[in-house]
RNA sequence: GCGGUUAUAGUUCAGUGGCAGAACGCCGCUCUGUGGCAGCGGAUGUCCUGGGUUCGAACCCCAGUAGCCGCCCCA
């Protein structure tokens, strides 16, 4: 398709879903709703954007999702330059730098005029008080100076500020740029918001906010909706993607911690995939233990990796440093033997976690749900504890997949500490999220084009009304209203169409054509033709709906 | 963020320096109130954008943008 530069298009990583494909989406969602209903889940709809802190604390500040893949912006930002200038004049300013009471800002050493909009000021948290950000012009200005900042100046500045607690009049210098931090008491001027990158944190936030735990009841909630991550698009990965997910959580006394809940969720997913008609799915299961188990294990893993690291591929060497758990996920064939020799997390679980996992497996065995334990299955999000799982379909190379290299259809796990991480009461839980985009791709690949064609066939309308002549248009719409109110699906043509054209149009979209000409209007006896049989009959207007329904 | 690849009609695509093309779809006619078939005719283009080379560029060169696929990472 030609893509002229002045044409507005869906932005990178987003797309339009059009009929008839949307029929498939609706079918998937209605099957999901019906399964969830049978397991006692109710629907929850949380906002599409939340306070950035929710994801920073819930998902994990150090995860890739939070550190570089979120759509985040400052909402309600205000910048009153006159006020800033006044406060600056009143402040004690160290030589070569400018200081603003209650704010942090950055200025080149040579001392520029303050008329240049050097800073934007933002309220962040109580601890940090304020975060300054160079505006675009100022960054370019700094970059063009030979002895000053490099390309990641902005990132570097942000990290320094966010990561450190600010004391009065702290000052530092980076590449010839003085950064001055000052405590202050500005009123709140903006809030950092983020498009949700996943929905579990939002659900738990809502659970806390509405004191759902106080009901004493186990909460079973499902959601269907878009999520957002700023990733490079790829097969089955979009920047706005859809997830179907569910969460089971509640106070311990409601049984939320029971391994039965884990098994029930897994068994429900098996049922859902079967009812959707997904073929060849596999359930992979593991336990990552408690938060403490995990921390201990990561340390042990790090130590085990240290002596053999140099034998691993480049990617894994890096992972060994930054995120040892990811080494376990590596598919590099040369490294498999070494990876198999690494300590297994199963050996470092405490007794209750081990026992929990054994009971989950026993319940699955009893319900006849097939699974395989994958000791290497670790999840990227910080909040997971104990049970983690993934459902996959046959991977790349297999045409039945449709997913390319992304063979995970859904993933999830237990998150016993998440509520407390967000400042809520103890509320153990387990949940999952299905990548709906991937689910659809898989269904399309497995069921093929004939399925989609039949989907269209089912949506053919009951009738197409062909008015003959412009004078019949009004009567045609009136007839359509009558029939639609009787529950029929009807399309109306236009009186200017030649009858031949009406027939062609009608055959494409409807099962019957109703001819509405002068004779028909006068007599009240309508002419109906059925496309499938080619039979044409005359039917009294008041018997029409009845006859077409048959 | 990195790599590969692609970009021409509504769609799928052909076109390796010399008039902008095919198939399907769309519109019309053959056929004034009867579709599917057939024949004939027609309309539709920023050849992704900008620059360069050339008498001449959809085509060659440079840069950019976007799609797709993969890597990183992750559901």
Image: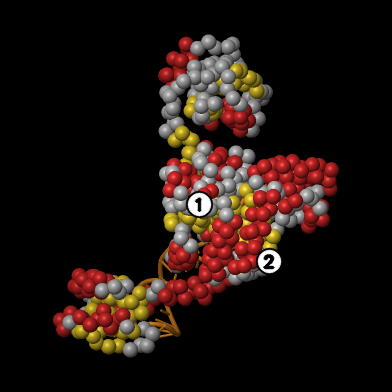
Chain for disc number 2: A
Q: Is residue A549 above or below residue A470?
A: below
Residue that mark 1 sits on:
A254
The answer, for residue A446, to whether it is visible in the render is: yes
Q: Secondary structure at mark 2?
A: loop
Q: Is residue A162 above or below residue A410?
A: above
Residue A540: where, in percent of width, then height?
Answer: 20, 84
Q: How is the image coloured?
A: secondary structure
Name which residue lies at 60% across and 68% down: A367
Camera-side residue of A550 and A450: A550
Residue at the image position 38 percent from the left and 85 percent from the top: A532
Q: Is residue A305 left or right of residue A507?
A: right
Q: How many marks?
A: 2
Rounded to the nearest whole Å, what is the CA distance between mark 1 and mark 2?
45 Å
> Which is nearer the eye, A95 or A108?
A95
Q: Give how far across and how far down residue A506 sits, in percent.
A: 34, 77
Give the quadrant of residue A61.
Answer: top right
Q: Residue at x 23, y 85 (%)?
A: A539
Q: Is residue A3 visible?
A: no
For label 1, the SS is: helix
């Amino acid at each position: 398709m030609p893509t002229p530069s002045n044409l507005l298009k869906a932005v990178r990583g987003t797309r339009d879903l059009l009929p008839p494909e949307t029929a498939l989406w609706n079918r998937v969602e209605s099957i999901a709703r019906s399964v969830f209903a049978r397991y006692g889940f109710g629907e929850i709809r949380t906002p599409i954007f939340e306070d950035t802190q929710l994801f920073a604390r819930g998902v994990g500040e150090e995860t890739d999702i939070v550190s570089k893949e979120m759509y985040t912006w400052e909402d309600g930002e205000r910048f009153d330059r006159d006020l800033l200038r006044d406060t600056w004049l009143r402040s004690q300013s160290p030589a070569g730098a400018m200081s603003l009471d209650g704010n942090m800002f950055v200025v080149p050493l040579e001392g520029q005029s303050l008329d240049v909009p050097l800073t934007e000021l933002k309220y962040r948290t109580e601890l940090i008080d304020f975060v300054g950000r160079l505006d675009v012009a100022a960054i370019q200005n700094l970059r063009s100076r030979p002895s000053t900042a490099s390309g990641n100046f902005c990132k570097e500045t942000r990290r320094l500020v966010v990561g450190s607690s600010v004391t009065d009049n702290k000052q530092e210098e980076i590449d010839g740029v003085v950064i001055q931090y000052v405590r202050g008491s500005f009123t709140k001027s903006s809030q950092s918001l983020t498009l949700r990158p996943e929905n579990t944190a939002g659900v738990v936030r809502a659970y806390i906010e509405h004191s759902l735990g106080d009901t004493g009841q186990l909460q079973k909630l499902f959601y269907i909706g878009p999520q957002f991550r700023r990733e490079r698009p790829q097969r089955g990965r979009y920047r706005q993607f859809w997830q179907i997910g569910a969460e089971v959580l509640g106070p311990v006394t409601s049984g939320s911690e029971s391994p039965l809940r884990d098994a029930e969720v897994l068994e429900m997913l098996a049922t859902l995939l079967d009812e959707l008609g997904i073929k060849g799915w596999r359930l992979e299961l593991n336990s990552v233990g408690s938060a403490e188990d995990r921390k201990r294990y990561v340390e042990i893993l790090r130590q085990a990796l240290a002596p053999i690291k140099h034998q691993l591929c480049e990617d894994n060497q890096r992972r060994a440093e930054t995120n040892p758990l990811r080494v376990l996920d590596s598919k590099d064939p040369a490294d498999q033997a070494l990876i198999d020799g690494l300590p297994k997390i199963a050996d470092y679980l405490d007794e209750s976690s081990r026992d929990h996992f054994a009971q989950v497996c026993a319940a699955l065995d009893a319900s006849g749900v097939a699974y395989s334990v994958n000791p290497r299955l670790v999840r990227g999000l910080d909040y997971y504890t104990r049970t983690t799982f993934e459902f996959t379909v046959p991977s790349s190379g297999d045409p039945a997949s449709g997913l390319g290299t992304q063979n995970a259809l859904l993933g999830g796990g237990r998150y016993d500490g998440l509520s407390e991480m967000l400042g809520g009461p103890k509320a153990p839980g387990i949940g999952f999220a299905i990548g709906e985009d991937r689910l659809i791709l898989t269904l399309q690949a497995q069921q093929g084009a004939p399925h989609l064609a039949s989907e269209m066939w089912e949506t053919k309308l009951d009738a197409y009304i062909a008015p003959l002549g412009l004078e019949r248009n009004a009567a045609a719409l009136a007839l359509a209203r009558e029939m639609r109110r009787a529950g029929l699906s009807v399309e109306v043509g236009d009186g200017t169409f030649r009858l031949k054209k009406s027939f062609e149009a009608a055959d494409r979209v409807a099962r019957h054509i109703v001819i509405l000409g002068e004779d028909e209007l006068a007599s009240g006896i309508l002419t109906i033709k059925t496309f499938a049989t080619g039979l044409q009959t005359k039917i009294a207007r008041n018997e029409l709906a009845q006859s077409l329904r048959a």
